[in-house]
Amino acid sequence: MLWLVERWQTRNLVSLVLWPLSLLYCALAVLKRWLYLRRILPSYAQDVPVIVVGNITVGGAGKTPFVVWLVNWLKSQGKQPGIVLRGYGGQSKYWPLTVTATTSATKAGDEAVLLARQTGCPVVAAPDRVAAIRTLLLEHDCSIVISDDGLQHYRMRRDLEIAVVDGMRRYGNGFCLPAGPLREPRWRANRVDLVVVNGQHTDDELGMTIEATGFRNLANGETASPGYFIDRPVHAIAGIGNPDRFFLTLSQLGLQSNNHPFPDHYRFEPADICPDGASDVIMTEKDAVKCESFADKRHWVLMVGAKPDTNLTKRLTDWLESNIG
């Protein structure tokens, strides 16, 4: 799969061969959206506002750190947010699933557990976001719901759509799956309420950056500064949508790491995170929740946080005052 993702950035022989399938995928995506917008297929509103934070492209844009920031910001504004998400990779026999900081990542998926730990707010996972929201509101007194992903889940009506875009990859070669990274045609980005670019952005775009805040040891909880591993041999592993961004972050911190990319949401085994018996191993926060049960003192997680620009915060403040007060 990684070899195909790499080819999504340019129009090449592979993408051109897959282009007819891409046209079919695009047509079905547009038809699905049209059927829901015209109320031919049923969609469901909720008693509280729903904000969808999603992607036009497949994974790796920095959506999860942004959701963490957004939830914590809403708390600072006196709101009571709750989170729903698909629970991708989770193997629970029953959905919706209420997720806590101690829920197994195998059961709920890595993103769900990470969000529960980093936000401390209610989290419910289910492939059906409408069912997840109903469970969330039944079990918790939430004044606003954040859907992590779900931009294409049109059964769930939403009050605000936010698309997070990777400032490096942008929209790739402009093709829909499987010839390119787009889940919907490129014009869909012009239909959302806010486009947030992770990294370099234009003057008419809203921006944010993902900043490293330090390292945490998976075995003993010890923390270290961002410069701790400079001039030390380390391995870096990443099973996320855009592993190159993680490796670049380590490089910008001054690390010279031996990099090991894995497919998105990869289910790690002990052998995967022990490339040799001596060097330290650094991983992402998403991967850490899946590896902590068999990690040892060599294993560290890079802690990061989203930092939005002032224009983004102002736009969110204006929306909040107009829609909730």
Image (tube, rainbow, N blue to C red):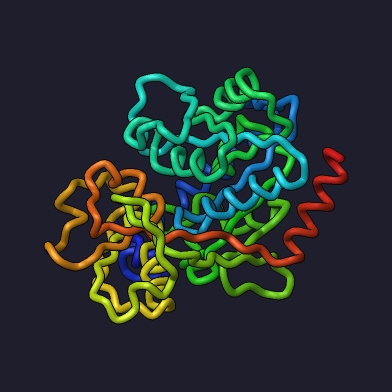
Asked whether, in this view, residue 52 is left or right of residue 295, the answer is: right
- Farthest residue in the left direction? 277
Picture quarter with the N terminus? bottom left
Foreground: 165 or 267?
Answer: 267
Asked whether, in this view, residue 143 is left or right of residue 167, the answer is: right
Picture quarter with the C terminus? top right
Residue lying at 31% horizontally and 62% vertically, measured from the top left = 282
Residue lying at 33% horizontally and 73% vertically, measured from the top left = 229
Asked whether, in this view, residue 284 is left or right of residue 219, the answer is: right
Residue lying at 59% horizontally and 36% vertically, measured from the top left = 121
Asked whether, in this view, residue 312 is left or right of residue 25, the answer is: right
Q: Is residue 111 visible?
A: yes
Across and down, in percent, residue 25 comes to 46, 47
Foreground: 47 or 268?
Answer: 268
The answer to which quarter of the image holds residue 6 is: bottom left
Across and down, in percent, residue 136 comes to 60, 25
Across and down, in percent, residue 251 comes to 38, 77
> Above or below — where is 3 with respect to 116?
below
The answer to which quarter of the image holds residue 202 is: bottom right
> Above or below — where is 255 with respect to 87?
below
Across and down, in percent, residue 78 comes to 77, 41
Residue lying at 37% horizontally and 57% vertically, measured from the top left = 222
Q: Is residue 18 visible?
A: no
> Above or below — where is 189 with respect to 120?
below
The answer to which quarter of the image holds residue 15 is: bottom left
> Above or below — where is 104 with respect to 229?
above
Give the tally of numbered discs: 0
